[in-house]
Image: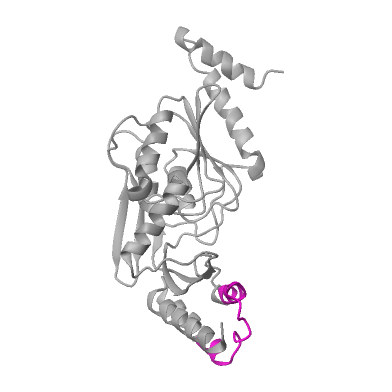
């Protein structure tokens, strides 16, 4: 890249932040700062897109620490958000290659379900069938370990779809997304799902790490605030402002937060603070800790004849 192209990219980024950022006054201040830096030639020497991405992102986050606000470098070409056909193809292909985010689905010894979702919670239009299949396989387990340690974000609609498998009865209010620029509030509730569901009474352990972010955090936070799951692991990354992507260069994407989350229980969100686990342990130990607690739960269940083999299976996990 040459200096004129760099300045054009930064100026376009500044305009997007000024127009769309979730906190308008802050956005205008950031935009003024970027425009001034670009005009003074502070970025002219950053001809490598990855280096430019790193420096501009650091400058974007000065004073606000909003990890969703970035000039993001992509090794592959960035999809064009103004071309719905291209963007649909990009996300559909990614979801297909990632099995809809259902990275691991397993019935563990002791009839305990394990669902690992990574790298993201893809939209139901691309991953709803994969989630339905995973939850159908796990619906009859006696406890669930939901591993979000590698879940870096994703769709709030998919969060609601996951939660819809984990509650019973009347719809449950999960989260609101507010767009300050328009005043529009979008509510998210659980809804009826076809086929078997895990339900609202059996215990759930959610595993987190410092890398759990954005949509992965929303799923964690919704379940924690509603008292539906026990969170085990590390404090999460702290990104609660859903963002939109804008292509500025074949390998550079502006990601600009447009909305803020408001949880109906807490009245706030996890932006900048992350989510504090109910049981804080290193991420590498979270699975073992949660699985042991799940085994203890299974061993406390009534020893009906048809469950004897399951109880023996559970006891064998930590024998000796």
Whether residue 174 appears in this view of the structure is no
140 sits to left or right of 45: left
Write down the quadrant of residue 228 in the picture. Answer: top left
Whether residue 261 is visible here, answered yes or no, is yes
Q: In the displayed orientation, state which residue is furthest to the bottom.
A: 40
Instruction: Give the residue at x 38% y 78%.
Output: 19
Residue 223 spot, x, y in % from top left: 44, 43
Residue drawn at (46%, 48%) of the image = 97
Q: Quadrant of the C terminus?
A: top right
Look at the image and tell me in which quarter the N terminus lies.
bottom right
Asked if the stretch drawn in magenta spans residue 164, the answer is no
Please tell me in which quadrant of the rendered image residue 88 appears.
Answer: bottom left
Residue nearest the observer in this picture, 211 or 293: 211
Q: Indicate the position of residue 261 as horizontal and vertical percent values.
A: 40, 59
Looking at the image, residue 175 lies above or below residue 112: below
- Residue at far top of view: 305
Q: How is the image coloured?
A: one colour
Q: Observer-nearest residue: 258 or 73?
A: 73
Q: Which residues are magenta?
A: 35-58
Tell me the chief SS of the magenta region.
Answer: helix
| Residue 205 versus residue 63 in the image, above or below | above
Task: Measuring from the top left, give residue 71's x and y in whole percent.
Answer: 52, 72
| Above/below status of 138 relative to 262 | above
The residue shown at (40%, 76%) is 24
176 displayed left or right of 237: left
Q: Position of residue 84 (x, y in %)?
A: 32, 64
């Amino acid at each position: 890249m040459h200096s004129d192209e760099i300045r054009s990219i930064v100026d376009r980024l500044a305009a997007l932040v000024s127009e769309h950022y979730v906190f308008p006054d802050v956005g205008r201040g950031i935009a003024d700062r970027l425009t001034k830096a670009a005009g003074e030639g502070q970025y002219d020497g950053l001809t490598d897109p990855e280096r430019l991405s790193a420096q501009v992102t650091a400058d974007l986050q000065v004073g606000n620490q909003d990890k969703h606000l970035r000039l993001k470098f992509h090794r592959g070409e960035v999809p064009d958000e103004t071309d719905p056909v291209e963007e649909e193809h990009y996300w559909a292909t990614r979801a297909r290659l990632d099995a809809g985010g259902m990275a691991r689905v397993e019935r563990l010894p002791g009839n305990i379900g394990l669902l690992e979702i990574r790298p993201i919670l893809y939209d139901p239009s691309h991953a709803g069938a994969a989630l339905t299949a995973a939850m159908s396989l796990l619906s009859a387990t006696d406890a669930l370990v939901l591993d979000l340690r590698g879940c870096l974000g994703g769709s709030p609609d998919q969060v609601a779809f996951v939660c819809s498998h984990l509650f019973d009865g009347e719809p449950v209010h999960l989260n609101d997304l507010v767009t300050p620029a328009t005043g529009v509030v979008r509510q998210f509730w659980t809804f009826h799902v076809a086929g078997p569901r895990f339900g609202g009474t059996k215990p759930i352990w959610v595993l987190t790490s410092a890398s759990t972010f954005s949509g992965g955090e929303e799923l964690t936070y919704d379940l924690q605030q509603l008292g539906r799951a026990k969170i085990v692991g590390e404090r999460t990354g702290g990104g609660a402002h859903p963002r939109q992507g804008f292509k500025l260069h074949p390998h550079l994407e502006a990601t600009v937060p447009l909305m803020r989350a408001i949880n109906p229980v807490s009245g706030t969100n996890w932006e900048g603070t992350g989510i504090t686990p109910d049981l804080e342990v290193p991420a590498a130990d979270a699975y073992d800790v949660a699985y042991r607690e799940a085994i203890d739960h299974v061993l406390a269940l009534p020893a009906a004849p048809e469950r004897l083999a399951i109880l023996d299976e559970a006891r064998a996990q930590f024998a000796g």
